[in-house]
Amino acid sequence: MMKGFLVVSYEFIMRLLFNLPRYKLINKIKIFFLKCVGAKVGGGVVIYPGVWITPGRNLTLGCDVDLALGVLITTTGGVQIGNRTLIGYRTQILSSNHQIPPVGESFPISGNIHKPIHIGDDVWIGANCIITAGVTIGTGAVVGAGSVVTRDVPDNAIVVGCPAKVIRYRDGAEVAQLS
């Protein structure tokens, strides 16, 4: 019963605080709250209104990270976001998921899978992306809007689609085509 009260209290405070605008002072309060629940947060982080981070522990945000309007991050599996990284509107970073149970068993009691997500420095994740548990996005990568990242993304790769696939690299190198 106490655990339920604490979870709902966390959600209440998160909703109130994280719906506030991104004024510098309010961002400092949001960051203080995240640190109180166990997150590690670098300097210059900007948190737009509507961001939802739960449970907060196992989260590391580098310096100058920008979390746009409506970003959702689940941190139970662990999430590390590198320096100077942009996370676009309504993107979901999901380090946990329900386990698929055998036929005849119920989803709510099937258990959960928790896997860490690592996002490198200087990454740009476009709007409405989904980053799934266990994925690493390399330094300098770009994830196109609406992409679903289910596999690791190499450094400096540009990926798009569902599931996300490398279309080229930032240095202009083309992706080798299979003949």
Image: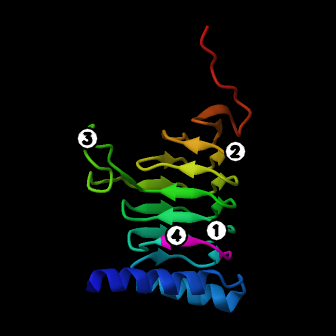
Residue at image position (52%, 57%) is 93
- Scheme of colours in the image: rainbow
Q: Is 48 colored magenta in this rendering?
A: yes
SS at mark 4 in the image: strand
Mark closer to the chain start, 4 or 2: 4
Mark closer to the chain start, 4 or 1: 4
Name the residue type under label 2.
Gly
Q: CA distance from mark 2 to mark 3?
A: 38 Å
Residue at image position (50%, 71%) is 53
Q: Residues within 10 Å of mark 3 (few under 14, many from 20)?
A: few
Name the residue type under label 3.
Gly
Q: Image height check: is 125 above or below 172? A: below
Where's residue 129, x and y in %? Answer: 62, 50
Residue 44, by quadrant, is bottom right
Q: Which mark is residue 61?
A: 4
Q: Which mark is residue 67?
A: 1
